Every structure is written in C-alpha cells, then in structure tokens.
Image (spheres, rainbow, N blue to C red):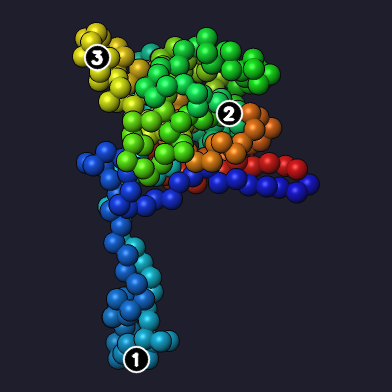
C-alpha cells in the first residue's frame, strides 16, 4: 500500500519571530572554506590545497533551548509533579508508545486570538468531524497561528486550550496533544490582560498545568495542519532523548496509508 508522509515540523531558523527575544535560537554556519583547517588539523602534514577544491566540511554551531523549533514537551516542563503528586517524567522517560498513534485534528482557526477553548467546544468539534476519541489518539489543534509562523505577530496569534478542555482529552486516554501556536495555552499577552482585570492566577498556563492532574505531552510549533483531514492518518513525534530535560526536538510527521 502506498505511503504518503506530510511534514508537520517547522525548520529551526534564526532571525525570524519564532520565540520571545530571550529564547530565540542562534545558528553559526561554518562553510566548507572556513572549516578546511579543521580537517587538516586531524592529519599532520595535510594542507588545505590537498583537499578537493580546498574544501573541508559544512557544520553548524547552535545556541538553542529544548523548546526552540517543533518540540515535544514532557510533563516535567509543566510542574515537578504529575498524576496528583507523582514525580513528573522528563523527556527521556516519555513512553515511546505515546508518540506514534492515530492523529485527530481539531480545527479552531475561527476562534479569536487569545480565546480559551472549553471542553464543550472540544466535544462539539469531535461531533462535527464524527470522531470518538480512543486512548492514545494524538490530538492536534489547528489555530490561526499556523499561518503566521515567522511573522511579527506570531506570538500573539491563536487560541489556547484551557484546563478543562485539556482534561477532557486526557480523561479519555489522550497522552499527546499538539498545536501550531507557540504555546498550548493562549498567547501570554492576551492572558496577561485578563489577569490584570481579574487577578486570578489560575488562568495562567492552565492548559499546561492540567499535567499536574494527568501527565501528558504536547507538541508546539507544528506546521501544515491546514493540509490535514480531521482523521485517517498516523502521527509520529518521537523526541530527542535528552537526559533529565523538559522537552525534546521532534520531526513530527503525519503518515497516510493510501
């Protein structure tokens, strides 16, 4: 049976709006000419003019966080505990069984930026697409942020998944979710305005904090969700195995058997 793979990941790229200024990645590109002397240093007597075209290798030096680019957050990112008091697992401890399962897409592009999605709205969307959640389904949320990645307003775009919406998924066995926005929660600038009005700290990072009750992972900065159907595909999102880390980079893909 033919297989089609759709890339759901953004490229790690410097000098675009992908994260807050304090967390932007930096990439130093070393080209073949610049690295020629690196090559000769391994082989005493070798000169750069003896290399093909006088060239060495291409290599890049990165200054990044584990949350740059498309990445999978571990429960440890949200809090030190999960499942009502257990030690939260780090990215190297996430069960691989969570990371390759049927995908389900919820289309929330019409919600206003900063809107917090409720459980009732998740349930209504599942009814609209005629899908009953199964344990370990990977549920991804298509927001208005996906079309603005790299633009000046990216960090302000998209709706967020609230605590009750997140728990609605987790209580039905979902353990990996995802979004094309910078955060699973609503953009911080919008939440900050609501906090200034209400003084209610429970609204801050509420979707993430749901992991304190039921441990789960989510993928942030997904791409191409607008090209996916509501279901009928698999998602693979295996993370880098970084010891004791709060997240790991992933080349998330959707796989169609056609």
Residue 197: percent from the left, percent from the top? 23, 10
Q: Report crowding for label 1: few under 14, some 14 to 19, many 20 or more residues within 10 A (C-alpha).
A: few
> Which of 95 and 66 lies nearest the eye of the viewer?
66
In what element is the residue under mark 1?
helix
Residue at 46%, 38% (x, y): give it: 147
Does 224 appear above or below 205? below
Q: Position of residue 213 (x, y in %)?
A: 40, 14
- Disc 1 target residue: 49
Quadrant for residue 212, please give it. top left
Q: Is residue 232 above or below residue 61?
A: above
Q: How far apart, in angstroms, are the residues tagged by discs 2 and 1?
A: 55 Å
Q: For the residues carrying marks 3 and 1, which lies nearer the camera in this image?
A: 3
Q: Quadrant of the C terminus?
A: top right
**Which quadrant would residue 172 be assigned to in this image?**
top right
Q: Position of residue 225 (x, y in %)?
A: 55, 36
Element class at badge 3: helix
| Crowd around label 3: few <14 · some 14–19 · many ≥20 (10 Å) | some
The answer to whether residue 193 is seen in the rendering is yes
Residue position marked by numbered label 3 in the rendering:
195
Q: Secondary structure at mark 2?
A: strand
Q: Is residue 42 visible?
A: no
Residue at 59% in and 17% down: 125
Density class for disc 2 (Cα within 10 Å; few <14, some 14-19, many ≥20) is many
The disc, 2 or 1, on the residue closer to the chain's N-terminal end is: 1
Q: Nearer the viewer, residue 182 or 209?
A: 182
Task: Tell me the residue that label 2 is attached to.
Answer: 105
Please identify the quarter of the rendering in which residue 112 is found: top left
Distance from disc 3 to disc 2, alpha carbons, whole Å, reads: 30 Å
Residue 211 vertical position relative to residue 226 in the rendered view, above or below: above
Distance from Cα at disc 3 to Cα at disc 1: 64 Å
- Determine the residue positioned at 51% across, 30% down: 142
* Of the image marks 3 and 1, the number of the one nearer the N terminus: 1
């Amino acid at each position: 049976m033919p297989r089609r793979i759709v890339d759901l990941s953004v490229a790690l790229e410097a000098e675009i709006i992908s994260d807050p200024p304090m967390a932007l990645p930096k990439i130093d590109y070393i080209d073949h000419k610049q690295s020629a002397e690196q090559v000769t240093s391994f082989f005493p007597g070798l000169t750069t003019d003896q290399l093909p075209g006088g060239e060495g290798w291409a290599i890049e030096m990165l200054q990044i966080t584990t949350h740059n680019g498309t990445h999978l957050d571990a429960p440890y990112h949200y809090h030190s505990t999960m499942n009502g008091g257990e030690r939260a697992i780090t990215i190297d401890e996430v069960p691989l069984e969570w990371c390759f399962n049927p995908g389900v897409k919820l289309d929330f592009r019409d919600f206003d930026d900063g809107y917090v999605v409720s459980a009732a709205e998740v349930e209504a969307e599942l009814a609209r697409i005629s899908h009953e959640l199964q344990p370990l389904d990977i549920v991804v949320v298509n927001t208005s942020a996906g079309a603005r990645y790299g633009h000046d307003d990216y960090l302000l775009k998209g709706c967020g998944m609230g605590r009750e919406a997140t728990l609605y998924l987790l209580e039905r066995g979902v353990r990996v979710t995802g979004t094309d926005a910078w955060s699973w929660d609503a953009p911080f600038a919008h939440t900050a305005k609501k906090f200034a009005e209400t003084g209610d700290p429970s609204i801050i990072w509420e979707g993430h904090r749901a992991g304190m009750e039921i441990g789960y992972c989510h993928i942030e900065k997904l791409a191409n969700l607008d090209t996916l159907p509501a279901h009928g595909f698999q998602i693979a999102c295996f993370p880098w195995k970084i010891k004791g880390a709060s997240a790991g980079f992933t080349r998330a893909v959707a796989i169609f058997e056609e």
